[in-house]
Image: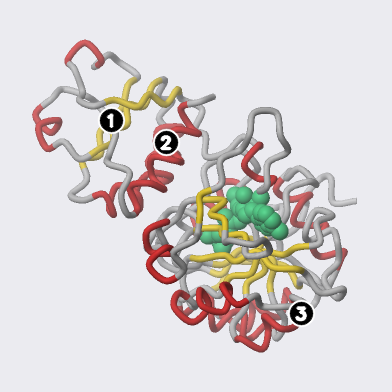
Amino acid sequence: MRETFLVQTVLTRDVSVAAAFIRAGGIVAFPTETVYGLGANVFNKNAVAKIFEAKGRPADNPLIAHVASIEQIEELVTAVTPTAEIFVKVFFPGPLTLVLPKSHRVPLIATAGLETIGVRMPRFELAHQFIKACRVPVVAPSANLSGRPSPTTWQSVLEDLDGRIDCILQGDATQIGLESTVVDCTGEVPMLLRQGAVSLRDLQAVVPETIEYTPLLGATPRSPGLKHRHYTPKADVVIIQTLESEMIIPGSAYIGLDQATLSQPISHAKVCGSVEEYAHSLFEFFRECDRLNIDTIYCEEVPRAGIGAALMDRLSRAAAE
Ligand code: TXA
Ligand code: MG
């Protein structure tokens, strides 16, 4: 049992060192353009089990398989549906995950018992090099302890998983900062399951019939991950339009776009120059607030357009606790 988690976590910038751990059945955190992932060889059941154990991830939450080539997609799925083919052409490599019917080679532990699998081809060069060097598709959830904000720096991976995983491939902070868009391509029409940097409008521009999934009350969610706790700092998250002076009390923090906040006496604030920067900074800001024992984080509301839709999705989930 790895219950005591006495693994020595190796830090490296060398793709071949990190990939050797995957080929030996280990688990490795690596950067992508969205967030850091915690990877294992998709075809190795024991290695995949270690991911669930290290993260404390519920066994009913399926993993995304990451590929470095189109050929690797064919190892994972029984069919690339016509709409999925269009999305692959337009958005791969990039921050988009397509859910497709899985091939029998993929163990059910990787998909949490589902007959479908999420497939994504990261566009971040270091991720691409790493997956290529692994020579197998790499299943990877975000490299955080279950329930915590996804890590966007290797230091945050270390904070959560030191001693629990074999290796961290060190790269820069991730560019986008929010997890990939997830689209189910197994049905009649593509269904957006999770918002990300590829927006509903981007998807509809190439496949107009794409719809957004809205869970019916009490029904089993299509994307099992959606029912679990997510993205949450220890502090209360409160979504606001503007920071009012009475909100500024000891133990409160602010993140948003409002430059006027810079002149306010709030002890911890991050004023972003754009919605993209806001999205990129959010999870790391949540973690900083935890380190500072902040009680309440005020987060400015943004229009639900472009990456703003994904940002508001994560903020609403964090605020719903
Ligand atoms: O950007 C990302 O997607 C990052 C990086 C590492 O690639 N990964 C990531 O993985 O965010 P994770 O496990 O934290 O989130 C995966 C989401 C979950 O909501 C899960 O339920 C959904 O994708 N998902 C995975 N496979 C699925 C499937 N077969 N059917 C429906 N939803 C699926
Ligand atoms: Mg996650």
Q: Label 3, on which residue?
A: 23
Could you say where residue 294 lies in the image, as x and y percent from the top left? 40, 24
- Image quarter for residue 267? top left
For residue 52, above or below residue 27: above
Q: Earlier in the sequence, mark 2 or mark 3?
A: 3
Which residue is identified by label 1?
A: 254
Which residue lies at the image location 29% right of the left edge and 34% below the top edge? 301
Instruction: Give how far across and how far down residue 9 sits, in percent.
Output: 67, 61
Observer-side mark, 2 or 1, equals 2
Residue 232 image position (x, y, % from top left):
52, 34
Where does residue 180 sit, x and y in percent of width and height? 50, 59
Tell me the SS state at disc 3: helix
Q: Residue at x 87, y 73 (%)?
A: 104
Label 2 or label 3, whichever lies nearer to me, is 2
User: 272 left or right of 251?
Assistant: left
Instruction: Answer whether residue 143 is visible to the viewer in this image.
Output: no
N-terminal of the two: label 1 or label 3?
Answer: 3
Amino acid under disc 1: Tyr
Pick the quarter of the image with the C terminus. top right
Residue 315, which numbered label? Answer: 2
Q: Amino acid at mark 3?
A: Arg
